[in-house]
Image (spheres, helix red, strand yellow):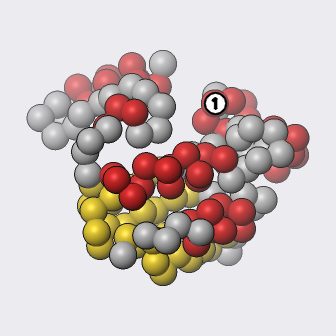
Amino acid sequence: DALALARENVERHDLGARVELLHGAWWAPVAGRTFDVVVSNPPYVDPLRTDLIDPAVARYEPAAALFTPPGDPAAPYREICAGLEAGLVPGGTVLLETGVEAAEPALAVLRAQPFLEAARLEPDLAGLPRYLIARRA
């Protein structure tokens, strides 16, 4: 459904020559490619902590976009990092969104990658820990 909606938006804004839409899990659809920047808003809410979700968000976002495996909010960040060494060019940047209870575990995942440097957590406009940023050495 998300890909169909994205396709509609690409067509509506006449971006077909500039946007490529792919379907698959994590790095699979782009295997063998490298990127200067990797950006992701992965799931970061533990399904055991649904109290952390704004009801408006829970009403409209699909569960796959919100929830990590139970008890493991860092799991998506490990998946992303598993492909970063091959997929991110030297000197490239990774930018990831995160949430309150996932922020520190996710930052620890980035900091554990020997090929990444300057991993840090930045706040959003409300002052909440929200953005993970790192650079490939």
Q: Identify which amino acid the numbered label 1 is placed on.
A: Ala
> Circle 1 sits on which residue?
64
Residue 50 seen: no
Instruction: Say how many tags the image has.
Output: 1
Residue 37: percent from the left, percent from the top? 32, 60
Q: Nearer the viewer, residue 117 or 7?
A: 117
User: In the rendered view, would you say 44 is above or below 98?
Assistant: above
Question: Residue at the location (66% across, 47% down)?
Answer: 75
User: In the rendered view, would you say 86 is above or below 124?
Assistant: above
Q: Which of 29 and 45 is in front in this view?
A: 29
Question: Residue at the location (50% across, 55% down)?
Answer: 81
Residue at the far bottom in the pictured view: 118
Q: In which quarter of the image is residue 100?
A: bottom right
Residue 20: percent from the left, percent from the top? 24, 33
Left/right of residue 49 with respect to residue 79 in the rendered view: right
User: In the rendered view, would you say 119 is above or below 99?
Assistant: below
Residue 94: percent from the left, percent from the top? 42, 63
Q: Which of 88 and 46 is in front in this view?
A: 88
Question: Residue at the location (62% across, 63% down)?
Answer: 109
Give SS at disc 1.
helix
Residue 52 seen: yes
